[in-house]
Image: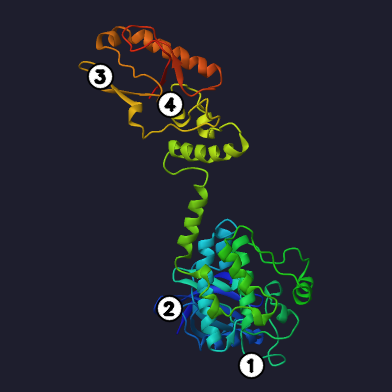
Amino acid sequence: MAWIIGRTIGRGSSFTVSLAMYSQSGEVLAVKSVELSRSEFLQREQRILSLLKCPRIVAYLGSDVTNENGQLVYNLFMEYVSGGTLTDAIRQQGGRLDESAIRSHTQAILQGLDYMHSRGLVHCDIKGRNVLVGQNGTKISDLGCSRWVGEQPPAMPIAGTPVFMAPEVARGDEQSFPADVWALGCTVIEMATGRPPWLDVADPVSALHRIAFSSDLPDFPRFLSEEAKDFLGKCLRRDPTERWTVHELLKHPFLEEDCLEQLNLKRIQSSISATSPMSILDQGIWESLEESETEKEEATPLHMPNQLELVSSSNSPAERIRRLIECTPSSSSPTPRLPDWTWDEDWVTVRRKNHAEHVVCVGHDQTCMSPTDQYAETNRSSYTHLIRDEEEELELLGRSSTTVHYSVNSSNFNSSSQRLVYIL
């Protein structure tokens, strides 16, 4: 079928990748091209791709040989994946992917590897640049280094990218299914950090020597969840017989359908450990209760929540809430306590003619205030100024008390003794 080549969209070690379009149908595709004399790996990839059909592996569309400026060129046609490589996607996301994206890409790669391994095929070069990302999902590509399980050296030389190689591969022992699992673990690190593993090595030869003969493992990103770290631990085991298979890894908790929801729940629970989701009052009550228990052992002063300490106005809603939260210790108990809100006698209804109802809370050992309607109306101003003066005095003293004490001498009140009132 006739086709038209377009712009170059990528390059490999020996080939170029270009956009192309079938002249008759207008279908867009990708074309890998290399000189025919250097096309051994590309022709090998063509033979392998022609035997595979999996949505997690880039699709094979055909091949041909063209003459360009007197030079024969081998062309391999594949489906076009618009998003580019996984390495490109990492760069576009600011240098690293969040854990939900890592989980999604990892699952797709494992599904492709599971298909390949079930057919006796080892990819041999899993890494970010050999994974494509598009509207139809994540797909494995670049199978030029792939080998069948029976193809061991010298029939098929060891191939791949040094920093992604497994220890047994770096030693030249074998390159089988466990090698793909190790490379997948390295790719997870690449997705999480934006960089390949073993950054502290100077060159590929040093990397191969360290991978092959030391007892070191690549560093696990600290910010990953425990599930993700455990998944990496199953991939990056130096002994290939101890590594999990791709089929086992597909069942790992990190890739479970509800894993993301569980991670989000853990983050929410962690974020509310210091701040109540309901209200400042709710937070203050629980913090005060917890601190009161501690104070019974350590006899330290009660500490108010930071949010309430920042309030500067003694007449603000937060300050009034603060007064409700705290209660000064009694003479019999040096430990601060909370008011008993269930005590019905604490609440006294005060009514005035043709006015709305008002409620005042009085301490257990105090006499209820019940001014007459006429006296309350004529003396409202002096009463208000008296309370305000007391509050300002408390403000100057650093709010050492959360209640207002005052004395009233009048025949209209039941007694002239000191009253304890919570101003609501």
- The picture places residue 262, in percent across and down from the top left corner, at 47, 61
| Earlier sequence position, callout 3 versus callout 4 | 4
Q: Is residue 71 visible?
A: no
**Disc 4 marks which residue?**
320
Q: Residues within 10 Å of mark 1 (few under 14, many from 20)?
A: few
Instruction: Decide which of 182, 35 is in the foreground and name it.
Output: 182
Dot 3 falls on a residue whose secondary structure is loop
- Comparing labels 4 and 2, the label whose residue is closer to the camera: 4
| Earlier sequence position, callout 2 versus callout 1 | 2
**Disc 3 marks which residue?**
351
Where residue 23 is drawn, which disc sits there?
2
Circle 4: residue type: Arg
Dot 2 falls on a residue whose secondary structure is loop
Q: Residue at x 48, y 22 (%)?
A: 313
**Disc 1 marks which residue?**
150
Instruction: Decide which of 89, 207 is in the foreground and name it.
Output: 207
Circle 3: residue type: Arg
